[in-house]
């Protein structure tokens, strides 16, 4: 599993993620290659954070062409619902990667999409939610929600709060590990931060 966090800042959206992945009998490895990042740069300045089964999440992360229809328009909930979710659903169905839980068709992962100052989640049930300020997906959600306590962290930047949350998640959840990756929608440059 993973932790991926997105939070609005004065200059757009900052996203952060851990770099630990697991495979086989939960052998832990650190993945820092472009294809191993849990935050993928998509066309049109879109950042796509993903958590969950790599087999499931990479289908969307590897289909950058699905975002071509956006052109110069801003990313919207409508675009995600009408253009991205149906293609993703079909791709998962064709590969037999959908599951039904409590009568709802789901997939084994989660996404955060950000562009400019907008944040959206594509949820396990294929619904799309616009996020007003911050969101976290994956393991360590309690730690990530430290970001909600802005009054308790008035002197800590969003970047500092995000790093604190990811460090706490790594300390309490063996499925989260350092180093951490940060990237924002303004500069679109990965920053690797050691624990």
Image (cartoon, helix red, strand yellow):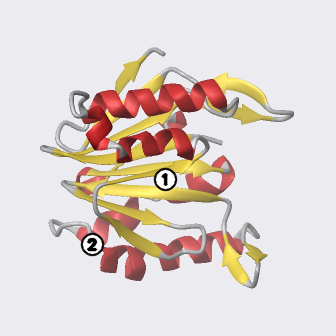
Q: How crowded is mark 1: few (under 14 residues within 10 Å), some or many (20 or more)?
A: many
**Above or below, comparing residue 92 to residue 61 in the picture:** below
Res. 33 visible in picture = no
Residue plotted at (46% across, 26% down): 180
168 lies left or right of 12: right
Sequence-first tag of 1 and 2: 1
Compared to 10, does 70 lie above or below? Answer: below
**Whether residue 143 can be seen here:** yes
Cα separation between marks 1 and 2: 18 Å
Q: Which image quarter is the N terminus in? A: top right
Counting from the top left corner in percent of width and height, residue 189 is at 27, 31
Q: Which residue is drawn at 32% across and 75% down?
A: 77
Toward the right, the furthest residue is: 25
Local crowd size for mark 2, using a 10 Å CA cut-off: few (<14), some (14–19), many (≥20): some
- Element at badge 2? loop
Name the residue carrying label 1.
61
In the image, what residue occupies the spot 19% across and 54% down? 116
Q: Mark 2 points at which residue?
A: 76
């Amino acid at each position: 599993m993973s932790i991926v966090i997105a939070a609005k800042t004065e200059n757009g959206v900052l996203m952060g993620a851990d770099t630990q992945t697991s495979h086989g009998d939960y052998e832990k490895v650190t993945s820092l290659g472009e294809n191993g990042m849990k935050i993928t740069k998509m066309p049109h300045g879109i950042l796509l954070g993903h958590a969950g089964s790599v087999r499931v999440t990479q289908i969307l992360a590897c289909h950058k062409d699905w975002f071509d229809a956006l052109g110069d328009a801003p990313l919207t909930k409508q675009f995600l619902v009408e253009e991205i979710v149906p293609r993703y659903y079909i791709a998962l169905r064709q590969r037999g990667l959908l599951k039904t839980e409590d009568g709802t068709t789901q997939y084994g992962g989660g996404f955060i999409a950000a562009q400019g100052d907008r944040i959206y989640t594509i949820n396990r049930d294929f619904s799309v939610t616009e996020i007003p300020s911050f969101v976290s997906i994956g393991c360590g959600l309690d730690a990530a929600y430290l970001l909600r306590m802005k009054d308790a962290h008035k002197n800590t930047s969003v970047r500092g709060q995000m790093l604190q949350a990811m460090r706490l998640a790594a300390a309490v959840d063996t499925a989260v590990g350092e180093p951490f990756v940060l990237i924002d929608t303004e500069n679109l440059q990965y920053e690797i931060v050691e624990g």
